[in-house]
Amino acid sequence: MINTDLSTQAREKMISTYRRLHQNPELSMQEYKTQEFIEKELDDIGLEHFRCGGTGVVAIDKNGEGPTVAFRADTDGLPIEEQTGVEYASTSTGELDGATVPVMHGCGHDSHVTAALTAARLIHEQRDAWSGTIVWIFQPAEETAEGSRAMVADGLWDKAPKPAIVLGQHVFPFESGTLHYTLNAAMAAADALKITLYGEQAHGSQPQDSIDPIVLGAHIVTRLQTIVGREVAPLDSAVVTVGTFNSGLKENIIPDRAELKLNIRTLTPDVREHVLASITRIVNAEAEASGAPKPEIEEIYTFPQLKNDPEEGEKVAEALRAELGEDKVIETPPLMGSEDFGHLADSIDVPSMFWFFGGAAADDANPAKNHSPRFLPVEDPTLETGVRAAIAAIGAYVAR
């Protein structure tokens, strides 16, 4: 067995690593300093590594014959101004669409990297306890669904040994010290669309000379909600959100165009296909009803559905229960959030397993959620739980 106990020195190193990462977040595909920091830590551990996917890093720990296991941690932050008030709060900024924006680790990727680096160090120090190969993947740009695809496109699985399974984890505002997992469909597929509506500009006092894209857009926004309410079966799951609606520059001018941005979440391929087709049908039909030109529908991004292999997932869950206790490892329903983690395994047709480790204090009845400016998992026992979970899951395959 691989020992998961942290010495005082290892614990202090873990905390300092976490706080350094938390204080210095970077936006997706801009994780240059984070990449350099990870590389220095890997050098200190003694692991060979290479860059992949732009700002990604891959380390390989080979220790004799045995299975190959990959473990992924994502590295990017979010364009959010931190409001946690801690002394190590982020004051970092980044460039987004030509503007300077505040950046924070509002989704816990700092804790993911910390857990992976700490686990990598502990495992590497115990080479008599395991045999095989571990591929540590420090992936950029999870938030924009670019990172896993960029790494695969950059030859990740040509440069690194092909694993028997890809593992990963995510901090979430469950109670700290607990782990949560779902077999089969674990997280939703996500699609983002930009819809440009075209009209005819006119003076606000002469609406008869216009084709009003704002009115057209309002009908589309309302009608889109009928997809989930009236087209998706009640026992299926889907979300259709209109996140932005932009049009016009002045109150007395009917504009010539409007722009909507949509976010769609689904749990099965059939429902996804139906929802996307329905969006196209409704947008085009409403435009025709308004006498407007055909709208333009563009994909912004797409996240693959995250599926946990039921057989391998249960094997990992058993190892997690053995490490943390039966009452601390909980099977839960799927989440409608999304992850690009699944592409790493899907691209080489191997199973994957992804779970959540809690970050909320036991006495916090209303913890800040991921992507909140107040999101700040408690350090103890959150970080240690992430480390122990990573080691236990990897150990299920490589431990002697």
Image: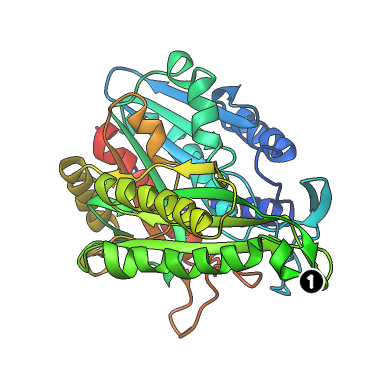
Residue at position x 56%, y 69% in the image = 218
Please determine whether, in this image, residue 219 is positioned above or below residue 182. Answer: below
Q: Do we see residue 215 in this rendering?
A: yes
* Residue receiving disc 1: 204
Residue at position x 38%, y 60% in the image = 336
Q: Quadrant of the N terminus?
A: top left
Colour scheme of the picture: rainbow
Residue at position x 55%, y 45% in the image = 294
Residue at position x 23%, y 62% in the image = 236
Q: Quadrant of residue 46?
A: top right
Residue 328 position in % (x across, y down)? 29, 67
Give 155 or 264, whichever is nearer the viewer. Answer: 264
Residue 95 position in % (x across, y down)? 80, 46
Residue farthest along the front direction in this orientation: 208
Give 268 or 195, whichever is nearer the viewer. Answer: 195
Q: Quadrant of residue 345?
A: top left
Residue 98 position in % (x across, y down)? 82, 45
Q: Residues within 10 Å of mark 1 (few under 14, many from 20)?
A: some
